Amino acid sequence: MLLVWVIGLGLPLAVGGVAAWLTMGSMEVYGALVQPPLSPPSWVFSVVWSILYLLMGAASVLVWKSDAPQEEKQRALRLYAVQLAVNFVWPLLFFRAGWYGTAMLWLFLLIALVLATMAAFRKISPLAAKLLIPYVLWLVFAAYLNVAVWWLNG
């Protein structure tokens, strides 16, 4: 049981960690851009994302450990894996490549996938779906920042 929690929490943290490692030094470029109102200081991103990855991981474990039919759990966890993969690519597009318009469209895809994941999780574990609410809210805020950076620096 402990192993399930270690893997469940560790996987999204590892995905985020690798993405952060691949975009090292990019926050300096981001900081030099014209920033929209409400832009948080750069340290906020790592703190918020760490919390969100832990919430995602906990949600996935609740789904994995549920008594729901295996097929339903597999479908929900496949959606989770796809959104996590899409999540991994966004910072590469935005921070590393500086493709703000492409990143914006990718972020809209991510939001749609997370909403689909929440819907699938809700059928299995309402708590798991609720744990993803801060993630969706942060993604909407990130979309605001992404659109504004694209607009102000395009």
Image (spheres, rainbow, N blue to C red):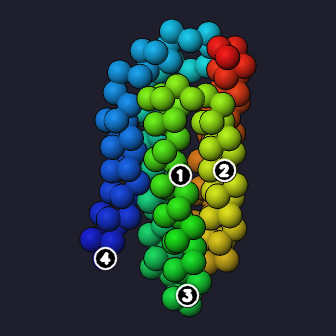
Distance Cα–Cα, label 4 vs label 2: 33 Å
Residue 133 seen from this side: no
**In the image as oriented, which residue stretches furthest toward the left?**
3
Distance Cα–Cα, label 4 vs label 1: 28 Å
Residue contact at pointers 4 and 3, CB within 8 angstroms: no
Residue contact at pointers 4 and 1, CB within 8 angstroms: no
Q: Name the residue under label 3.
A: 71
Comparing marks 4 and 2, which lies closer to the viewer?
2
Identify the mark nearer the N-term, 3 or 2.
3
Residue type, numbered disc 4: Met
The quarter of the picture where the C terminus appears is top right
Q: For numbered disc 4, what is the local secondary structure?
A: loop
Residue type, numbered disc 2: Leu
Q: For numbered disc 3, what is the local secondary structure?
A: helix
Identify the mark nearer the N-term, 4 or 3.
4
Q: Where is residue 140 in the image (x, y as percent from the top left)?
A: 69, 39
Distance Cα–Cα, label 1 vs label 2: 8 Å
Distance Cα–Cα, label 3 vs label 2: 24 Å
Residue type, numbered disc 3: Glu
Q: Where is residue 7 in the image (x, y as percent from the top left)?
A: 32, 65
Comparing marks 3 and 1, which lies closer to the viewer?
1
Give the label on residue 1, or none: 4
Residue 132 seen from this side: yes
How dense is the environment of label 3, judged by Cα within 10 Å: few (below 14), some, or many (20 and up)?
few
Name the residue rendered at 34%, 42% in the picture: 17
Distance Cα–Cα, label 3 vs label 1: 23 Å
Q: Mark 2 points at which residue?
A: 109
Residue contact at pointers 1 and 2, CB within 8 angstroms: yes
Comparing marks 4 and 1, which lies closer to the viewer?
1
Name the residue rendered at 56%, 12% in the picture: 33
Comparing marks 4 and 3, which lies closer to the viewer?
3
Give the label on residue 86, or none: 1
